């Protein structure tokens, strides 16, 4: 259930896994006050880009394989609304 090949919400487990990996990198970036270099030798910005790409791919897979067309359309609408809100918040905070 929830994994690739499942008939019930395939890919949902992958979203959880990828979000967890992205959260780990985000935590490391916060702990280093945004510096890319990490004591492990990792480039945290590079790791962040990779993990966010994995998360986006997991969401795209889930959309295509688990959601019905009306759900995909609703998700796209809500995503656009939220994105526009984030842009507005960013502008307000930058003033």
Image: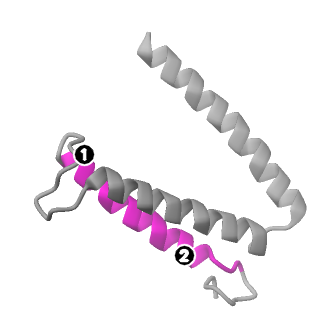
Image height of 14 relative to 3, above or below: above
Residue found at x 43% / y 61%: 50
Tell me, for residue 30, which label it has, or none: 1
- The stretch of residues the image draws in magenta is 9-31
Residue found at x 68% / y 80%: 10
Q: Position of residue 23 (x, y in %)?
A: 37, 58
Tell me, for residue 70, which label it has, or none: none
Q: Position of residue 1 (x, y in %)?
A: 64, 88
User: Which residue matches tag 2?
Assistant: 14
Image height of 32 relative to 3, above or below: above
Q: Nearer the viewer, residue 41 or 87?
A: 41
Residue found at x 47% / y 68%: 18
**How far separated are the C-alphas under marks 1 and 2?**
24 Å
Q: Nearer the viewer, residue 31 or 44?
A: 44
Q: Position of residue 83 (x, y in %)?
A: 63, 36
Helix, strand or loop for disc 1? helix
Horizontal relation, residue 64 to residue 14: left or right? right
Helix, strand or loop for disc 2? helix
């Amino acid at each position: 259930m929830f994994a690739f090949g499942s008939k019930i919400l395939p890919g949902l487990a992958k979203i959880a896994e990828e979000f967890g990996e992205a959260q780990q990198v985000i935590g490391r970036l916060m702990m280093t006050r945004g510096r890319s270099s990490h004591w492990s030798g990792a480039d945290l910005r590079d790791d962040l880009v990779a993990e966010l790409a994995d998360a986006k791919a997991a969401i795209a897979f889930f959309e295509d394989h688990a959601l019905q067309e009306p759900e995909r359309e609703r998700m796209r609408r809500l995503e656009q609304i939220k994105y526009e809100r984030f842009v507005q918040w960013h502008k307000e905070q930058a003033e």
